[in-house]
Amino acid sequence: MIAKKHALAVHFLTATGAVFAMLAMLAAVEAKWDMMFLWLVVAFFVDGIDGPLARKYDVKTNAPEFDGVLLDLIIDYLTYVFIPAFALFKSGLMDGWTGWVAIILITFASALYFADNRMKTKDNSFNGFPGCWNMLVLVIFALQPNFWISLAMVSVLAVSMFLPLKFIHPVRTERWRKLTLPVAIAWTFFAGWAAWVDFHSESWAHWGLVVTSLYLLLAGVVQQIIPKRL
């Protein structure tokens, strides 16, 4: 009975991500981008801890009536894809046709990717860019690059979702995890910091975001290039 309660509690924790997604969406509708990203950072934190808890309490065995994987994917699409795409379009950072191209690429490609049963590799990494658009959009809000640069980044990452490129999972990819996990925690900290100061152009959080984002984006590809020592 105790195991059942623990497993159900993990499912309930995962489901709070939907609440945080709604709070983020309400903030986005009112163009309160700092609050939107703060709620998305909270959702990102929950997403980072519910997986290990689900494995610890074996939710598939102890609470099988809820599909934790499906629940997680639904919330991830909202917080990683749909809301960030909406924010990118409505913020004015990508005006005119470029904004339309960006949101079509992001939502369409991500819907296909999330339904692809080949998205995970043998070492629990991702096969192709895993649709973490919340990370890219947050960096775009922080740095506010030229819209052509933003469109190029969106296009490259959308294509990379379907290429044989490896992208690490901050928690589940065992190789380099002692470095990756602290970097992911640092990214969460810098993301919250940047949103808290409303993306002030002189904030050091922006540099932290760039460095940690580049590591999380490229570490898997580097692992493919550098073979693992036996």
Image: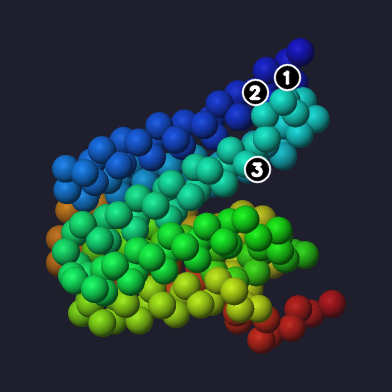
Residue at the disc numbered 1: 4
Residue at the disc numbered 2: 8
**Residue ID at (66%, 86%):** 225
Residue 93 place in picture, x, y as percent: 19, 67
Q: Is residue 184 above or below residue 158?
A: above
Q: Is residue 153 above or below residue 85?
A: below
Q: Quadrant of the N terminus?
A: top right
Residue 2 place in picture, x, y as percent: 73, 15
Residue lying furthest bottom: 225
For the residue labelled by badge 2, is the local secondary structure a helix, a strand or a loop?
A: helix
Q: Is residue 106 above or below residue 63?
A: below
Q: Is residue 224 above or below residue 183?
A: below
Residue at the disc numbered 3: 69
- Taking the image as shown, residue 47 lies to the left or right of residue 28, namely right
Question: Does any portion of residue 60 appear in the rendered image?
Answer: yes
- Mark 1 vs 3, N-terminal side: 1
Looking at the rendered image, the disc whose residue lies closer to the viewer, 1 or 3, is 3
